[in-house]
Amino acid sequence: MLGNGYDEENGVWDWQGRQIVKTQDVYFVICMTILIALPWIFTRKVKVDVEIPSSKVAILRFERGMQQGLLGRISRTSILEYHAFGTISEGKHAKYHYMVCGVQGDFTRGLVENPPTHIWTREIKFAGVSNTSTLYRRGIRIATGTGIGAALSTCLQSKDWFLIWIGSDQEKTFGKTIAGLIESGIEPERRILWDSKKLKRPNTMKLLKETYDSWGAEVVLITSNYGGNKEMMEGCKMLGIPAF
């Protein structure tokens, strides 16, 4: 960008910046600086209620509802180690939104072993894959385990989305709060809750294909671990099912 301030014809630098302001580079830098700074400007320490239904999961409850498809970042400190989680909410009108934090490292283990009463968060949320659900008339949201945190809001806030959740003893592992949201917000005909502890591991692609056809879906949105994502994405590609 500074190179644009050099006048090649006269071999001198334009220290008044007249040449620089005529280039698009300077405006790119200004926009990027604002976008980087905004999340930090809206960083706040907020009250949080933590539910620990099992040693594997912590459910964090925050005040205010929000639209579906957003991811939030939280940290124990104002500056270091922010972690992103999907948000669950019944809509902007709701009193609360939630995060499902599975125990996978020191940070999430600390939420279970030493639950906080307040936590740092960035009030400006960013969009995840689920946010694209509004582009489609009907779809399927499939998740495994803690992936329900990124998937549930889409089905709670739209009657045109079908939920498939595969997990082990979901109510015992994830607690009554998540089970209650599903029970009250998603009709039985719009959900499949597959308990792999009782029913063993499902034939995921058979389940997806049958639901895709019966529901008249246009797309499948997947949230799983690396292996699950890869298996389902490749399976959907072979079956000609649009999936992300």
Image: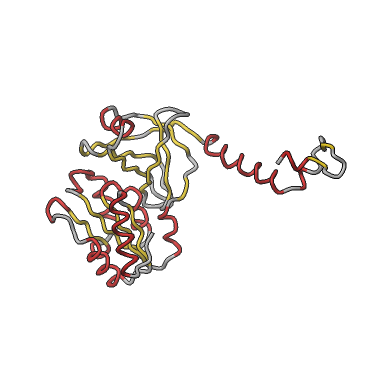
Q: In the picture provided, is 97 more to the left or to the right than 104?
A: right
Image coords of residue 74 (percent x, y):
41, 36
| View extreme (right): residue | 10
Identify the residue at horizontal 47%, vertical 37% (top origin). 122
208 or 54, which lies in front? 208
Question: In the depicted view, which residue is nearer to us: 185 or 75?
Answer: 75
* Location of residue 4 in the rendering, given as x and y in whole percent from the top left corner: 75, 43
Q: Which of 84 and 137 is in front in this view?
A: 84
Relative to the observer, which residue lies in front, 202 or 176?
202
Residue drawn at (47%, 44%) of the image: 125
Count the marks: 0
The answer, for residue 151, to whether it is visible in the render is yes
- Quarter of the image for residue 155 reads bottom left
Horizontally, residue 122 falls left or right of residue 210, namely right
Q: Which residue is drawn at 69% across and 46% down?
A: 25
Left or right relative to 92: residue 35: right
- Examine the rendered structure and indicate whether residue 82 appears above or below residue 21: above
> Which quadrant of the structure image shows residue 18?
top right
At x 42% / y 42%, what residue is drawn? Answer: 72
Pick the quarter of the image with the N terminus.
top right
| Residue 211 image point, x, y percent | 26, 67
Q: In this view, does 211 lie above or below 68?
A: below
Residue at the left extreme?
Answer: 198
State the quadrant of the C terminus: bottom left
Q: Which colour scheme is used?
A: secondary structure
**Which percent across, then down, holds residue 201?**
17, 55
In this rendering, does residue 148 appear at all? no
